[in-house]
Image (cartoon, rainbow, N blue to C red):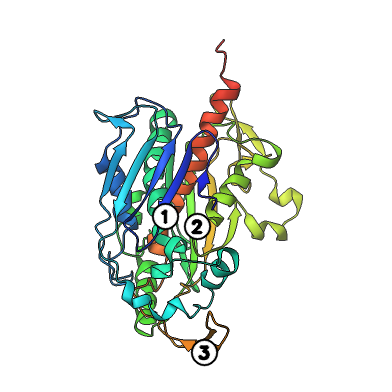
Amino acid sequence: MSSIFGELFRISTFGESHGGGVGVVIDGCPPRIEISAEEIQEDLNRRKPGQSKITTPRKESDLCEIISGVFEGKTLGTPIAILVRNKDARSQDYDEMAVKYRPSHADATYDAKYGIRNWQGGGRSSARETIGRVAAGAIAKKILKQVAGVEIIAYVKSIKDIEATNINQDTVTLEQVESNIVRCPDSAIAEKMIDLIDQIRKEKDSLGGTLECVVRNVPRGLGEPVFDKLEADLAKAIMSLPATKGFEIGSGFAGTTLTGSQHNDEFYLDDNGIPRTVTNRSGGIQGGISNGENIVLRAAFKPTATIGKEQKTVSKEGEETTLAAKGRHDPCVLPRAVPMVEAMVALVLCDHLLRHHAQCNLIEN
């Protein structure tokens, strides 16, 4: 299994949904970065289940344990291991799913690939795997903030056909995002989203939507031309998250309706003589390299695959049957996906920050 991500700032996640625990090993973290379990826990608390009426009722504290790589509150430069133990698994809820494939889930494909799978809670395909990503992302965010003042803020932009259109990407704050349980900084739209998700939850169904992520104070020059373009690595990072079905950056697909003269971001010199762009349809990246403007990206998440409504399926033995999934599942993954998106963006940017320094700042003039 490819469970390793990154080049210089490299992570390897481990664990299954109903195993002893899940976590991450981080290799390549610079030394002397101040970090605590409490700082990591802040992001894990935003990701954990049981937060509200519109998330899964599974009760997990998701308390993290730093096993190695940190001493007296600072990173050592050695591998950092972080563990979160599973406490509230109910494996018996998945007995029927041991032999029946959940529609649009990974059950059938895991069997086709490996000939074996952990069917309890989805095993490795469960979104619980993202705990390790979020924990590592908290450290990456700390590095980016400390070294370059980078700020990463993600939020729910739409749920089904309800969309927030009045969010100021330059001023939106974490406090605004966290002010409601759906994590949409537009409070009026957020209430409509919450009501719709709650209604669908009662109907044993699910919803999808989109997240938007804004990265401010991005240094110019991050990204590698050709295969490791910054937007290409961001796309891979986002699309590796469970339930993602789309990625776009800057103008995205809407930009295809414009002409070149309408779409181009014209340059000007700011007060410091630095080239800036009047508009930001490029989404902060040109030629695969950050240009210093806000990076703005969006991710599409499908409706949660595991639902309580009865659906047609087949069994592992090849018989047609039906399945109404049991267990505790999110009626909409987006509120808990916000810290996951932030984490993956942070991991990519932190990795490219180290790569840029290694290549371009080897010898200081």
The residue sitting at 62% across, 54% down in the picture is 251
Q: Determine whether 71 is above or below 199 in the image.
A: above
Residue 212: percent from left, percent from top: 49, 56
- Amino acid on which disc 2 is placed: Leu
| The quarter of the displayed image where residue 285 is located | top right
- Amino acid on which disc 3 is placed: Thr
> Label 2 neighbourhood size at 10 Å, few (<14), some (14-19), many (20+)?
many
Left or right of 75, for residue 285: right
Q: Tell me the number on the disc at residue 321.
A: 3
The residue indicated by pointer 2 is 241
> For the residues carrying marks 3 and 1, which lies nearer the camera in this image?
3
Query: In the displayed image of the protein, which residue is found farthest to the top?
Result: 365
Left or right of 87, for residue 360: right
Q: Determine whether 124 is above or below 291 in the image.
A: below
The reply to whether the C-beta atoms of the residues labelled 2 and 1 are less than 8 Å apart is: yes
- Along the line of sight, the residue nearer the viewer: 11 or 115: 115
Q: Determine whether 34 is above or below 163 in the image.
A: above
Residue 345: percent from left, percent from top: 49, 46
Q: Is residue 23 visible?
A: yes
Left or right of 276, for residue 182: left
